[in-house]
Image: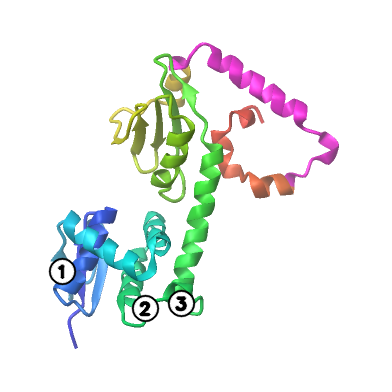
Amino acid sequence: MQQRTTLSYDGSWVGLLTAIFEVYEYKFDAASIQQMAQADQGDLFGARHEVHTDHAKAERVKKGVINRVGKKDFQELYAAYLSELQGVEDLILRLVRNYLAPDGVGLSQNYGHEDVLRIKQINKSVSRERHRFKAFVRFRKLSDELFFAKIDPDFNILPLIIPHFRDRYADQSWVIYDIKRDYGAYYNQSEVVEIHLSDLPSEREIMERGEDKEALYDELWRRYFRSTNITERKNTKLHLQHVPKRYWKYLNEKFDL
C-alpha cells in the first residue's frame, strides 16, 4: 500500500494547479493537497511534498482540463477554489483526475456522480454570493476622487466581481477591499491591481475623507427609499429572502433602520 502524500501549496490558484500537475509528475496515487499552514498540522505519519508555484505547470493543467471538458467546467473548478471550503482542494483534484481519465468526457454533466454534484452545489452558493455583491457593493467617494468600498463576503468572490465593476465604472478610479481576507482591487481607469493596505481606514475615517456631498446623497437616498416603501404591502419575510440582513451593513439606505 502506497504511503499517503500531502502536497502543501501557497494557497494560490496557480499553486493549486501546480500541485495537481505534480501529483501526476511524481505519480502520487494516494495524495491530498492542503495549504501550507494546514499541511503543517496534517498527517504525522504520511509523506510531505512541498509545491513551488510554477505557472508553466499550472497552464498545462488548465489547458488539459479545458481541452477535455471545456472552459465552463474549468471555471467551475476555479469558483469552487474561491469558496475556501475545507477539503475543496481534494475535491478539485479528484474531479481533474476523473475529467482527464479516458471516460472523463461528459462526466461534468453526470449529476449522479457524488463529486460532480458537490462541485455544482458549491458553484451555486458562490454564484449567489457573487450576484448579491454585484448589487450590494456601495462606494463612497473620497475627496481625492477615489471611490472606496469595503466588503467581507463569506466566499472569496472579489476576483469574480471585478469584471462587472471594471466595465460599469470604466471612467472612474475605485477600490473594493475585502476586509476579511485583507486584500483589495484597485482600478486606475486602465488596469486592476491587487493591493494590501497596512492601515485600513475605519468607517469614521472614510466618512471624514468623503466628499462634502456624500452625506447629502446618503440622506437623499434614504428619503427615496422611505418614500417608495408602501407600509400596507410590507413583506418582511420576502424582503429578507432577497436582501438577507447580513448584507444590510453595506447599504446606506439601511443605516438608520
- Vertical comparison of 245 with 66: above or below: above
Kindly report the distance in space between the C-alpha atoms of the residues bearing marks 3 and 2.
14 Å
Relative height, residue 63 to residue 203 (above, below): below
**Magenta residues, start to end:** 208-236
The reply to whether discs 3 and 2 touch (Cβ–Cβ < 8 Å) is no
Q: Dot 1: what SS?
A: strand
Look at mark 1 in the image and give the residue it sits on.
48
Which kind of residue does numbered mark 1 sit on?
Arg
Sequence order check, earlier mark of 1 and 3: 1
Q: Are marks 1 and 3 in contact (CB under 8 Å)?
A: no
- Give the residue displayed 34% in from the left and 29% down from the top: 190
Q: Is residue 254 left or right of residue 148?
A: right
State whether residue 239 is above or below residue 203.
below
Q: Amino acid at mark 3?
A: Glu
Q: Nearer the viewer, mark 3 or mark 2?
A: 2
Front-most of residues 161 and 200: 161
Residue 169 or residue 212, whichever sits in front: 169
Q: CA distance from mark 1 to mark 2?
A: 29 Å
The residue carrying pointer 3 sits among few (fewer than 14), some (14 to 19) or many (20 or more) residues within 10 Å by Cα, namely few
User: How far from the left and from the top, in percent, is residue 143?
Assistant: 43, 14
Q: Label 2 is placed on what type of residue?
A: Gly
Examine the image and state in which quarter residue 239 appears: top right
Quarter holding the C terminus is top right
Residue under circle 3? 114
Give the residue at the far bottom of this rendering.
1
Q: Which residue is mark 2?
A: 104
Q: Residue at x 83, y 40 (%)?
A: 233
The residue located at (48%, 77%) in the rendering is: 110
Number of other residues with Cα within 10 Å of mark 2, as a class: few under 14, some 14 to 19, many 20 or more? some
Mark pair 1, 3: CA separation: 28 Å
